[in-house]
Image (cartoon, helix red, strand yellow):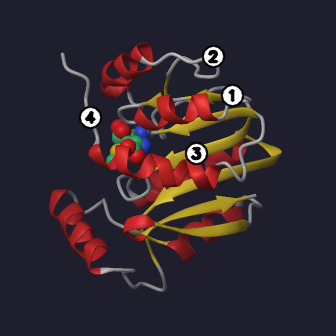
Amino acid sequence: MQRPFSQAAENNKGPIAEVLARYLDHGDLLEIGSGTGQHAIWMAPRFPDVRWYPSEQPENMTGLNRWLEAHPSPSLQAATMLRVQGRWPEHRFRHVYTANTFHILSRPLVERCVQHLCEHLTPQARAYIYGPFNYQGHYTGDGNRRFDLHLKSQSLSMGIRDQEWVVALFARHGRVLLADHAMPANNRLLVFH
Ligand SMILES: C[S@@+](CC[C@H](N)C(=O)[O-])C[C@H]1O[C@@H](n2cnc3c(N)ncnc32)[C@H](O)[C@@H]1O
């Protein structure tokens, strides 16, 4: 079996790492929905003091493991099987990172995800959410409008989320928006503290 490949992950890993470099000091980082693992294998060596824990749903573990095995690095940990609606690791993390998952998960699953990830953060921890977001119900560009229609043609439970809704979900768990970084291709990197 060939390794799965994401061109988007190749394109956005550099800009994401540049922003994360301002925040990732040390400690354990849980990545939710690692996908192919292209982010994990690229970021882990760049942040040697951060133990990077990739995770995925059971059906995508094989592809993820192929990338992790091909690119080992000291801070890169073995992948954890994690479905947002299932059991989460007992561990507490200083950082939780997820890219391009909030528009894939249904709204109830985004709520579950935020609840669980807040429960799994240490008190001083931060969460980093990367992807496209709407502001006050408006798309930030035509590309995002087309992408949202494409998602909804696949499943009505998918779609670009409102940034304000995500901020309110984190606020329910006592976490505040620390920064909202503009990223290439009309994406954002939201940082919660
Ligand atoms: C668009 S991909 C993003 C992958 C990777 N983070 C990236 O940016 O290239 C969305 C990922 O979310 C994962 N995912 C979808 N539903 C999930 C769930 N219920 N629990 C955990 N992960 C889920 C998928 O398996 C997939 O890898």
Q: Nearer the viewer, mark 3 or mark 4?
A: 4
Q: Which comes before the other along the chain, label 1 or label 4?
A: 4
Nearest the viewer among 114 and 14 is 14
Residue placed furthest toward the right: 124
Local crowd size for mark 4, using a 10 Å CA cut-off: few (<14), some (14–19), many (≥20): some
Q: Residue at x 39, y 85 (%)?
A: 138
Element type at mark 2:
loop
Which secondary structure lies at badge 3? strand
Q: Which amino acid does the dot numbered 2 rest on? A: Pro
Question: How many other residues sit within 10 Å of disc 2, few (<14), some (14-19) or many (≥20)?
Answer: few
* Coordinates of residue 173 in the picture (x, y in percent): 72, 58
Regarding residue 102, the answer to whether it shows in the image is: yes
Q: CA distance from mark 3 to mark 4?
A: 20 Å
Could you give the CA–CA distance between mark 2 and mark 3, rounded to whole angstroms? 19 Å
Which three-letter amino acid code belongs to the residue tagged 4?
A: Phe
Res 5 label: 4
Left or right position of 42 against 128: left
Residue hosting label 1: 48
Residues under numbered marks 2 and 1 in contact, where contact means CB atoms less than 8 Å apart? yes
Q: Nearer the viewer, residue 184 or 94?
A: 184
Label whose residue precedes the other's in the sequence (2 or 1): 1
- Separation of residues labelled 2 and 1 (CA atoms): 7 Å
Residue at 74% over, 29% down = 49
* Disc number placed over residue 74 in the picture, else none: 2
Above or below, comparing residue 9 to residue 68 in the picture: below
Q: Identify the mark nearer the N-term, 4 or 2.
A: 4
Question: Judging from the image, what secondary structure is the residue with disc 1 in?
Answer: loop
- Circle 1/circle 3 CB separation < 8 Å: no
Residue at the spot of label 3: 97
Camera-side residue of 162 and 141: 141
Q: Quadrant of residue 33?
A: top left
